[in-house]
Amino acid sequence: MKESNAPAIGRTPFQKWLDKYQGLFYLIPWIIGFVVFKAVPFGQSLYYSFTDMNFFESGTKFVGLANYITAFTTTKITKALIITFKYAFITVPLKLVFALFIAYILNFKIACVNLFRTVYYIPSILGGSVAIAVLWKAVFSVDGLLNTVLRAVTFGLVQGPEWLSDPSYALWIICFLRIWQFGSAMVLFLAALKGVPADLYEAATIDGAGKWRQFFSITVPMITPIIFYNLVTQICQAFQEFNGPYIITNGGPRGSTTLISLLVYNYAFKSYDMGMASALAWIMFIIVCILTIIAFTSQKKWVYYSDER
């Protein structure tokens, strides 16, 4: 073919700049949303935590670390912090254990396995909703479904305890609601189990290793990256739990289910003390950051990545 002698039309500097940075224009809606709904409130809450901010009172004053000092010297708040840690350290390990156990079972070739996977995942879709929290409250109330079944089975000999009115039971009921929602972690574990090479199990079987030895020596080490990911995400979710304690017990009885997130709500929207609410939110944020840093630091000792030598 004969080459064209027509002069090439050069692009202007603006067109070249537009070609290079036009991707940023597509990000403008996200950037605006992030700045308006994330970055600005984030910065404002940090500023409010050092003030006595109140939406219904004029004249906000800078109080320095007073809110933080009050938080760590007030019995109600320190008790809520302890309960929050207790809640997290109960729910996170049990949820991961149940999720891994069910995923391990569903990894076998059994009849209707896809149906079982769907059924076990449903609580994760519904569990965080207000309707399920209300249903949970109805099940464990004094005349709820559980006590009714107990009375029917024992012919009225066992009345059942007041699950939500007894401090020794109430926190566990809230914990069970979170543990019941293990579907998302289960799906991730199931995907990780599918990725474990079958030849490792074959070699272990030839060497005489049983199922338990294979599980702890092959399965668990190979899926530690997913265990680590689930651990970090579940810790973050546990410290932000709100719906269950608020709807089921409203922090009671006698503050036994008052998590720090519930105190943030009470200070912000009941006492209108936005300064203290912001300080509590930042305390919770710092705690989650510290636990996450500890997890990331410790992963070098127990998390195995296949691309590492």
Image (tube, rainbow, N blue to C red):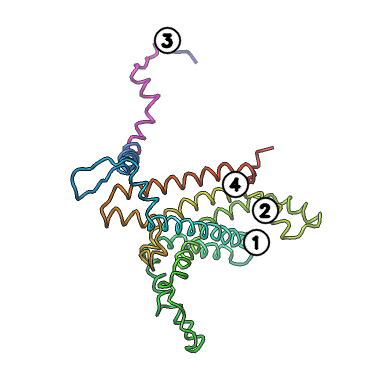
Distance between mark 1 and mark 3 Cα atoms:
69 Å
Q: Is residue 138 left or right of residue 193?
A: left
Q: Earlier in the sequence, mark 2 or mark 3?
A: 3
Q: Amino acid at mark 4?
A: Pro
* Mark 1, residue position: 108
- Crowding around mark 1 (Cα neighbors within 10 Å: few <14, some 14 to 19, many 20+) is few
- Crowding around mark 4 (Cα neighbors within 10 Å: few <14, some 14 to 19, many 20+) is some
Helix, strand, or loop for circle 2? helix
- Answer whether residue 184 is magenta in the image: no
- Residue 130, given in percent of the width and then of the height, sits at 36, 63
* Residue at 72% in and 56% down: 214
Helix, strand, or loop for circle 3? loop
Residue 248 visible in the current orientation: no
Q: Residue furthest right?
A: 207
Residue 19 visible in the current orientation: yes
* Mark 4, residue position: 225
State yes or no: discs 2 and 3 in contact (Cβ < 8 Å): no
Give the magenta-colored segment's residue range. 7-30
Magenta-drawn stretch, dominant element (helix, strand or loop): helix
Q: Earlier in the sequence, mark 1 or mark 3?
A: 3
Helix, strand, or loop for circle 4? helix
Distance between mark 4 and mark 3 Cα atoms:
60 Å
Q: Which mark is nearer the camera, 1 or 3?
A: 1
Q: Which mark is nearer the camera, 1 or 4?
A: 4
Distance between mark 2 and mark 1 Cα atoms:
14 Å
* Mark 3, residue position: 5
Residue 219 - label: 2
